[in-house]
Image (cartoon, helix red, strand yellow):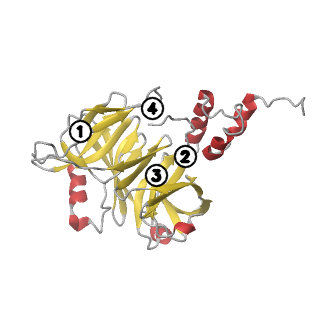
């Protein structure tokens, strides 16, 4: 045993790169040699490999608890249905007022809106915008100014595309209404984008609540911001062509005849659009069996994927995020 050669570091990196993030974290406890989780070459390589195999992230919530699972994001299969296993990640307590937002580069966002009043008693809501820059020696939040006047963010999920964060807001009138806010992470500048009138009419019309998705769904469509709505027979997609000119394009996709056979009577919600141009839908609550549906825009086909392994959390509320990746970078405490 004394003559046993040390395992080359290149071989260790190759072995660990095949593992999920959780076992890699445990490997840090083996020895200094195995503690390569903070190695820049390894973390960059792991992120590249993780991006090539995106996952669905399931956030299961009930009362003051949230449980996270992940599963492979199965794309563009020829089969009408298939089965995949979910991997349990973690669970932790959560406040009633907290909202779960989609992940970016392996980081999950939990929001907790707290409203207050200004000291002068004029009734305005206090809004603070803060930025935390990761990767610095000293982590600290910085307050930045937003030049756009709005009442509060809507309940809908925002989305980050190519370093720009988009989220819908209620605009202070007159007239009152809705708009999209763009925040460029690089320049730390805010910009407003007008929402097409047709979307606003459908979104805010109570008569369409049974026909249309109640929420305005923001999606990443071929690297551009998209707004997605669905009625009984079609999907409607608006794509932001030019943010400065507030220019949008509209697309309509008629559902295939196989839709009813695959989806049946399931009460499903739009999750988003994958990089392979498939619209993902799922039920609001966890059931047994639990299915995720993929509608292929280009092929006009629908397929069903059964997710197994979450039976113990039946009837929990389900929030699904697309394109989840695992990141093994070490972060300091904030």
**Label of residue 54 in the image:** 2
Q: Nearer the viewer, residue 54 or 300?
A: 54
Q: Residue at x 69, y 39 (%)?
A: 16
Numbered disc 3: secondary structure = strand
**Label of residue 321 in the image:** 3
Q: Marks 3 and 4, Cα distance to the nearest angstrom?
A: 22 Å
Q: Is residue 242 visible?
A: no
Numbered disc 4: secondary structure = loop
Q: Marks 1 and 3, Cα distance to the nearest angstrom?
A: 25 Å
Q: Nearer the viewer, residue 58 or 230?
A: 58
Confirm or deny contact between disc 4 and disc 1 (CB under 8 A). Answer: no
The residue carrying mark 4 is 134
| Discs 2/4, front | 4
**Label of residue 192 in the image:** 1
**Label of residue 290 in the image:** none
The correct choice, above or below, for 82 with respect to 14 in the image is below
Q: Residue at x 72, y 35 (%)?
A: 31
Numbered disc 1: secondary structure = strand
Q: Residues within 10 Å of mark 2 (few under 14, many from 20)?
A: many
Q: Is residue 168 visible?
A: yes
Q: Marks 3 and 2, Cα distance to the nearest angstrom?
A: 11 Å
Q: Residues within 10 Å of mark 1 (few under 14, many from 20)?
A: many
């Amino acid at each position: 045993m004394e003559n046993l050669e040390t395992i080359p570091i290149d071989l260790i990196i190759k072995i660990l790169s095949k593992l999920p993030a959780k076992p890699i974290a445990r490997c840090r406890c083996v020895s200094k040699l195995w503690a390569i989780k903070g190695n820049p070459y390894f973390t960059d390589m792991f992120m590249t490999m993780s991006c090539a195999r995106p996952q669905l992230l399931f956030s299961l919530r009930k009362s003051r608890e949230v449980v996270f699972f992940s599963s492979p994001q199965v794309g563009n299969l020829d089969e009408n249905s298939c089965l995949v296993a979910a991997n349990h990640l973690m669970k932790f307590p959560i406040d009633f007022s907290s909202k779960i937002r989609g992940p970016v580069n392996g980081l999950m966002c939990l929001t907790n809106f707290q409203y207050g009043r200004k000291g002068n008693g004029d009734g305005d809501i206090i809004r603070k915008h803060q930025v935390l820059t990761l990767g610095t020696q000293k982590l600290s939040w910085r307050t930045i100014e937003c030049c756009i006047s709005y009442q509060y963010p809507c309940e809908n999920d925002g989305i980050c595309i190519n370093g720009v964060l988009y989220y819908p807001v209620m605009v202070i009138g007159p007239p009152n209404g809705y708009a999209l806010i763009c925040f460029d992470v690089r320049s730390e500048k805010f910009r407003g984008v007008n929402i097409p009138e047709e979307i606003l009419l459908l979104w805010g019309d109570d008569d369409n609540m049974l026909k249309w998705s109640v929420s305005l769904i923001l999606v990443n469509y071929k690297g551009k911001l998209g707004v997605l709505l669905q009625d009984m027979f079609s999907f409607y997609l608006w794509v932001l062509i030019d943010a400065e000119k507030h220019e949008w394009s509209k697309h309509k996709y008629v559902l295939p005849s196989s839709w009813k056979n695959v989806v049946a009577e399931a009460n499903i919600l739009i999750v988003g659009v994958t990089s392979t141009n498939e619209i993902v839908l799922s039920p609001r609550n966890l059931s047994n069996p639990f299915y995720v549906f993929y509608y292929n825009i280009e092929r006009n086909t629908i397929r069903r994927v059964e997710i197994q392994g979450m039976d113990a959390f039946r009837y929990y509320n389900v929030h699904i995020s697309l394109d989840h990746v695992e990141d093994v970078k070490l972060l300091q405490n904030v």
